[in-house]
Amino acid sequence: MPLTARPPHPREQCHFTGVASCLAKDGSLRECPCYRESVSDSGKQRIVAINDDTAFLQLLEELLGEMEGFEVHTIKQWDTAYELVRDLQPDLIILDVVMAQEERGWNILELLTLDPRTSS
């Protein structure tokens, strides 16, 4: 899925990769998955996977990315997951509730279920 032109990144580090290396010298993101086409523009079903296992996220993105009709976003950083899910408004969330820091997945799930924008 091609990345579209993006506005400057709102933070100093990438939401998805958690590293500052996504930032270009001008402060914009060139290869970051944070600013893909929106589902409303593409007409695709938006899927968000939250997991601390990079290999799992890559496999999922490859498998679902090959299928027509899906826009896949992967999130490895638990501390930005809730905010990103709220902003992306996905059709499906795949959440690893047993992350390296035991309670993090359950905390994200609780936040998502308490927020009316993400609870359905």
Image: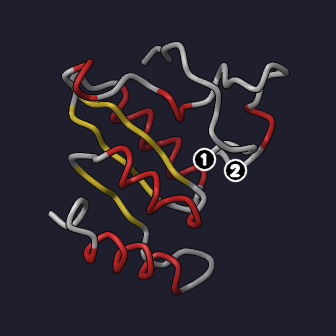
- What quarter of the picture does the C terminus occupy? bottom left
Give the image location of residue 80, x and y in percent: 55, 59
**Label at residue 70:** none
Answer with the quarter of the image where residue 1 lies. Answer: top left
Q: Residue sitting at 28 percent across and 38 percent down? A: 46
Residue to which mark 1 is pinned: 15
The residue drawn where x is 80% and y is 19% is 26
Rendered position, 31 above or below 116: above
Q: Which of 30 and 115 is in front in this view?
A: 115
Whether 63 is drawn above or below 96: the answer is above
| Secondary structure category for the residue under label 2 | loop
Q: In this view, does 20 lie to the left or right of 31?
A: right
- Asked if the residue under mark 1 is in contact with the one under mark 2, i.e. CB atoms within 8 Å, the reply is yes
Which amino acid does the dot numbered 1 rest on?
A: His
Q: What element carries label 1?
A: loop
Q: Give percent across and percent down for residue 67.
A: 27, 26
Relative to 107, is 3 above or below? above
Could you tell me residue 94's position as x and y percent?
A: 34, 58
Q: Residue 18 carries which label?
A: 2
Task: Specify whether 101 is left or right of 75.
Answer: right
Instruction: Name the image colouring.
Output: secondary structure
Using a 10 Å C-alpha cutoff, classify the residue at mark 1 as few (fewer than 14 neighbours), some (14 to 19) or many (20 or more).
many
